Amino acid sequence: MHRLSSLKELLSTEKLQIGVFVTISLIILFFTVALYLIGTPRFEIFFGSINPVFMISIIIVLGLGLVSILLSQEWVDIYKRENLKSLLLISLPTVPFALGAILVDLVFPYPEDTNVLLPKSLLFYPTMGFVVEILFHLLPLTLLLALLTSVFKGRDFDRIFLVIIVIISLLEPLYQLDFSGTGHPIWISAIEGIRLFLFSYVQLSILKKYDFLSMYWFRIIYYIWWHLVWGTIRLVVLF
């Protein structure tokens, strides 16, 4: 009964924030269904033979649970109206990150089919970006915050959060380096690993300072530069 009343209280006090997350989730689910019906083999790279609609539905439910914990503990915000005016400023650091990826692609080209092309990319990248934010950021963040704030009770929360940001920022580059199979020289892979680490670090810093929506927005703008704009141009320039 206590958990049920706590959930009702959370839904009442954080109705707007949870509503924004649910709205984004429903849009992502719609995108997933559309891509599945159209046929997007790229899902198989990430989910194997598992139905992507089922898989992303599970991830959305997981995300909602994580968001509920993060909000109830007042660890991060999901959406704050006043942060909308900062979205343009938040977008600016995506440019050097995208230019770094493009420079590597020019010198040591990625495979021709690296990017999902338009118009499918308009649905695919927001979807996979949302998945990444839940699995690579919200999930480990919630687990580590729950663990470290329990172990180090009374310690400076900002320091704990900083340590966690550094740890979590390692996950995406480790995944990319392990599964990308680009065949790049080791020093290029190292540079790319550092770039991806810094990318995640900036994202999580945005989450702490602003909210989840701002962090997700940062990734979407980066994907626009790298996957949509350059993903189209590179086919003419490199192939």
Image (tube, rainbow, N blue to C red):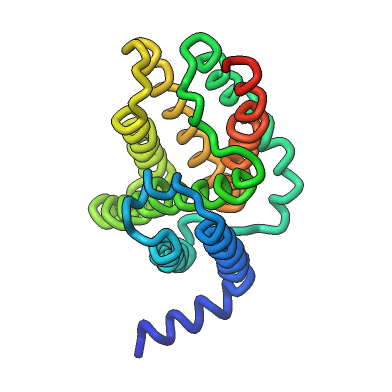
- Percent of width and height locating residue 124: 55, 48
Whether 105 is drawn above or below 1: the answer is above
- 198 or 105, which lies in front? 105
- 112 or 201, which lies in front? 112
Can residue 15 be seen here? The reply is yes
- Percent of width and height locating residue 35: 55, 56
User: What's the residue at 33%, 48% (across, down)?
Assistant: 155
- Percent of width and height locating residue 20: 62, 65
- Percent of width and height locating residue 94: 62, 30
The quarter of the picture where residue 164 lies is top left
User: What's the residue at 36%, 86% (across, down)?
Assistant: 2
- 206 or 230, which lies in front? 230
Which quarter shows the N terminus?
bottom left
User: What's the residue at 54%, 78% (across, down)?
Assistant: 11
User: What's the residue at 57%, 19% (across, down)?
Assistant: 102
Which quarter shows the C terminus?
top right
Q: How many marks?
A: 0
Whether 113 is drawn above or below 118: the answer is above
Relative to residue 191, is residue 35 drawn left or right? right
Residue at the farthest right position: 85
Can residue 190 be seen here? The reply is no
Relative to residue 103, is residue 145 drawn left or right? left
Relative to residue 69, is residue 90 drawn left or right? right
Residue at the farthest left position: 151
